[in-house]
Image (spheres, rainbow, N blue to C red):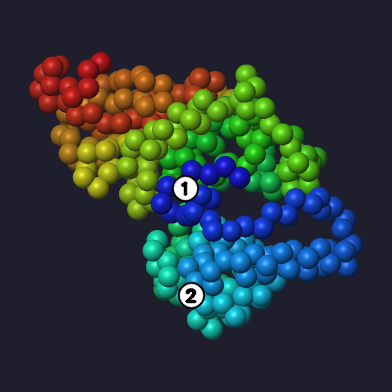
Amino acid sequence: MERDLHALFLQTSQWHNQVVHGEFLSRQLPTEVFLQRLFESHQAYERSLNSASQLETTLQTGIGGVPDAVLSYLTDRRDLGVHTELVSDGVIPLIDAGIINGARKTLLPRKVVLGFVLGSKKLFDYVNENPIFEFRPNFFTNTPDILQEVLQKGGPPAFKMRLALAATLSPAYGIYSGFELCENVAVPGTEEYLDSEKYEIKRWDLDDPKSLKDVITRINRIRQENRALQTTWNLEFYETDNDNLLCYGKSGEDGENNLIIVVNLDPFHTQSGWVTIPVKELGLGEHQPYLVHDLIGDDKYIWEGERNFVEINPQVMPGNIFRVRKKLKRETDFDYFM
């Protein structure tokens, strides 16, 4: 799984240990065979734990019977932390026993950091208003089980649209393998990949001419260079007069890194309309001209006041990431020339 995580989650380079299990698992695997393989995986994981320090261990758990069963093996541990995409019921007894407490963590100590939970009503009641849990978003363009109809039918523009949304709405986002090559073949009548990496080992040629690696690289660089895209708490949606256009803004803490993102949600047609920008919040006058610089395509436009016109052709690029450059009284007062 490829991810651009910034400081929200642990990078793989920070892992102390891992157990790799590459054996093929059939969709029709008999229960007794599955349980035997699960037990063998537990033994490997237990050996891994015994070879590592019992302290300062941070878990990435997941959901379902396998991670819950693995968690049940940790009752003799202490001071464990959790940084994970999602959790299920298996964390409850460990938190209640004080085994998972995050005491040794340096990143968000004493917090269980996660994206969402999936489990029983008991789990949801347990998490609700529980201060140990700190939710951080992690937007996925796609997953092994989520190949949306728009991706199945929308071609490369749909994939770029999903990329632009995930990469700008959340400081952490993920793409499932095959996305870069616009893999879009589903099990008929479902949103699941026909040839999913859940069931077979795939080898992708990222140098294929149809690869999206260049636009992914470009957008990731924009994320790294603009602190406004590295937090969640600054997201504000702006009004448009076209439902196929989604417009929102993000600003840096210093009020200088002001970004306006406009995405065409229709991968088949050019869409245009008027967007309403809260210029006063950006430190601009009601009728003041200002420059917006599209960081993806490098185009520049002069806007004025709140309402401004946009037109987006998804065959070129289905979204714009505009950085606002303020203009004063004269053309030479631009801090970034046309």
Tag 2 and tag 1, C-beta contact below 8 Å: no
Residue beneath disc 2 = 79
In this view, 66 is above or below 179: below
* Picture quarter with the C terminus: top left
Residue beneath disc 1 = 5
In this view, 166 is above or below 335: below
State the CA–CA distance, disc 2 to disc 1: 24 Å
Residue at 43% x, 54% y is 8
Given this view, does label 2 or label 1 mark the residue nearer the observer? 2
Q: Is 166 placed left or right of 224 in the picture?
A: right
Assess disc 1: are there few (<14), some (14-19) or many (≥20) residues with their C-alpha within 10 Å of its C-alpha.
Answer: some
Residue at 51% x, 31% y is 216
Give the x, y percent position of residue 215. 50, 27
Q: Is 98 placed left or right of 176 in the picture?
A: left
In this view, 283 is above or below 99: above
Which amino acid does the dot numbered 1 rest on?
Leu
Residue at 47% x, 63% y is 113
